[in-house]
Amino acid sequence: MKPMPVGNVVALFISKSGVSGRIPVPTMQVDPKGVCSDKFYDKNIQRSVLLTSTDSYALAQNEGIAMDHGLLGENILMDYNPYLLDAGTRLHIGTAVLEISQYCTMCDHLTEIDPILPQLLCNDRGIFAKVIEAGEIKKGDAIYLIAEDI
C-alpha cells in the first residue's frame, strides 16, 4: 500500500549570483551537494535545501505583513508544516529524498520586511534538509514522510 502524501510543493525557488532575491522555477534538480544551479550549491550540505511552510506566510499575513513567496529564502515552499520534524526525518519529494538536518536561524534581512518578523517567525521560518537521493522536484509534487523501519 502506497503511503498517503502529507502535503504538496506549492513553489520552488533558486538563488543566482548577482540577482537579488529568490527566482521562482517550475522544477529543480537536487543532488547530495544541494540544489543544482543555486548559488549556494556545494557550500554546506547540512543546509543545502531550505523548506518553508505556507503557514509561515499565513502567520505574517495574520499580523498584517504581506509578503511574496520566496522572501523567506526558501527553496521549497510546501503546504505542509515540517517544523516539528526531528533531525534525521526523511521526506520523499518528486524523485528525490531529503533528510531534515537542522532548524533555520533568523536572517537580519527579515527586519527589512518588517521589524517584528524575526520574533514572529522565530520557530516558523523554515527548516534545512540535506539531499540523500538525487532527483527532480516539481511544483505540485506530493510530499511523503518516509517511515523508519521498526
Image: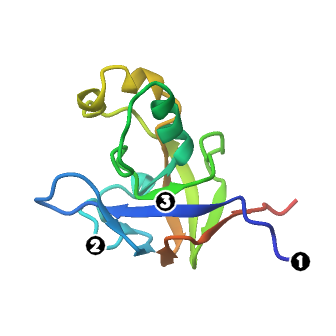
The disc labelled 2 sits on which kind of residue?
Answer: Ser
Mark 2 crowdedness (10 Å alpha carbons): few <14, some 14-19, many ≥20: some
Q: Residues within 10 Å of mark 3 (few under 14, many from 20)?
A: many
Amino acid under disc 3 = Lys
Eye-nearest disc, 3 or 2 = 2
Mark pair 1, 3: CA separation: 27 Å
Badge 2 element: loop
- Residue 13 picture location, percent across and down: 36, 62
Rendering coords of residue 150 (x, y %): 88, 59
According to the image, label 1 marks what residue? 1
Question: Where is the N terminus found, in terms of image quarters?
Answer: bottom right
Left or right side of 140 for 143? right
- Whether residue 2 is visible, yes or no, is yes
Image coordinates of residue 35 in percent, x first then y, are 37, 68
Rate crowding at label 1 as few (under 14), some (14 to 19) or many (20 or more) other CA atoms within 10 Å. few
Identified at 65% across, 60% down, the residue is: 90
Q: Is residue 134 visible?
A: no
Q: Earlier in the sequence, mark 1 or mark 3?
A: 1
The three-letter code of the residue at mark 1 reads Met
**Front-lying residue, 43 or 71:** 71
Q: Quadrant of residue 42?
A: bottom left
Looking at the rendered structure, which numbered label has been put on residue 17? none
What residue is disc 3 on? 130
Contact check, label 1 and label 3, Cβ < 8 Å: no
Determine whether label 1 and label 2 are within 8 Å by CB. no
Q: Is residue 70 above or below residue 24?
A: above
Q: Position of residue 100 (x, y in %)?
A: 57, 52
Q: Which residue is tagged 2?
A: 37
Q: Earlier in the sequence, mark 1 or mark 2?
A: 1
**Residues at badges 3 and 2 in contact (C-beta under 8 Å)?**
no
Query: Which of disc 2 and disc 3 is earlier in sequence?
Result: 2
